Image: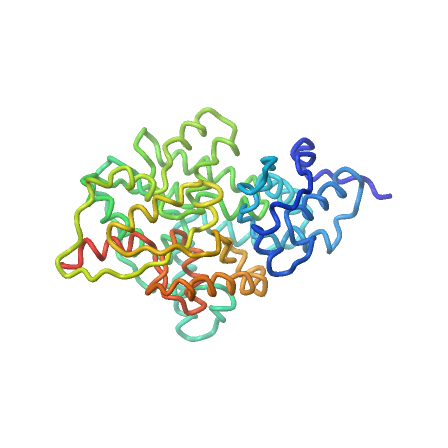
Amino acid sequence: MSARVSLGVDTEELASCVSCGLCLPHCPTFRVTGEEWASPRGRISAMREVQDHGAAVDDAFLASMDSCVQCRGCEPACPSGVPFGSMMEATQASLASRRRIDWRRWGFRVLGHRWLLNLVSRVLAVVQRLRLVPSKRLGLPKIPLVQDRLRASGDDVWLFTGCVMDAWQRSTHAGVKRVVESAGVGVALPGAGAGCCGALSLHAGLENHARALAIRTMGALEGSAPILVDSAGCGAALKEYGKHLGTSEAVAFSERVKDVHEWLAAQADRLPPVGKRHQEVTVAVHDPCHLRHVQRVHQPVADVLSRYATVVALDDDGLCCGAGGAYAAMQPDLAASIRKRKLEAIRRSGADIVASANPGCTIHLANAGVTVCHPLEIVDEAIHDDR
């Protein structure tokens, strides 16, 4: 028997899973494969075999771990409260230290440097227009060559702009900013220090890099003003800084973080009515996993949006769309199979458009031909359609 390998997973967390199987219907990879190794229960069993019984970290183990979307849809369904997300993060951190070659180790370092990310994005935009890169296969949107600069309007709230979303979807930030300002508040914008929240690095097991980005972000968003986030994945990461850094400063920081819809729902009476030429549309709301399962504040999206559109719910109980940050690029076949179920739910809804509060989800769904945008882009258009 080989020497035991510590995955860094808490032994009590490993023991907390009783293999009841209630997580299975909520796991997107189990739903499309029907295989135990692709379920939360199966992955936890594999972790136990490695950490407690000396099983090898072989190709089968790596495939099981890497195929996880890390959507955390299993957590709300678990009667034992198994913290599957933290177990996966610990396992991925252990695996990252053993992988000699992993493009994510270098690629994600770009995200923390805004000037470098903007440069790389412009190069990608040119290459796309020359049709030299398989954008859909890599899960890329059409990257803009030029974007308007965002300008602060006050200091009542911060708007976290992040990395990829700011580089590729800044127009979404602009629409969100206008909606927040329409509630009568001034919006502050972070500097380069808050260039990336660290979520992608953490999911890839690059723990030290994620921690460094978190500390930088906290330093760039000083004060006591609420921090509004329009990306579900970024919001989840920022809200968990207290857990990951383990300091009182990080806990206090995380308490300031609000999903922008969560904040707007509490300011609903301050939002303006629809514009004079507004024509109401039917919108299907796709709940991003990190808004529904991690932050657990997905309802405010529909609450805010329903003031300006006819909102219909999808009938798939919030199942993952398969985007998963970089997952669609790393596991394109599984991501497409997972997305197929979401597309079927969208078709059944009969909606004119789909709204999703996460950039990865909007990109992944748009690459399948879905008309999709951020919920507050719809609100922005409804409020300002008489301009």
Q: Residue at x 74, y 39 (%)?
A: 51
| Quadrant occupied by the N terminus | top right
Is 167 positioned to the left or the right of 378 in the image? right
Observer-nearest of 382 and 248:
382
| Quadrant occupied by the C terminus | bottom left
Is 278 positioned to the left or the right of 92 in the image? left
Q: Residue at x 45, y 41 (%)?
A: 236
Q: Position of residue 147 (x, y in %)?
A: 29, 59
Up-down: is 349 above or below 112? below
Q: Position of residue 99 (x, y in %)?
A: 67, 50
Up-down: is 344 above or below 244? below
Q: Residue at x 40, y 30 (%)?
A: 255
Q: Position of residue 126 (x, y in %)?
A: 39, 69
Up-down: is 158 above or below 123? above
Q: Position of residue 265 (x, y in %)?
A: 29, 41
Q: Residue at x 58, y 40 (%)?
A: 78
Is 237 positioned to the left or the right of 156 in the image? right
Observer-nearest of 19 and 327:
19
In which quadrant of the rendered view does residue 29 lie?
A: bottom right
In which quadrant of the rendered view does residue 10 lie?
A: top right
Number of numbered labels in the structure image: 0
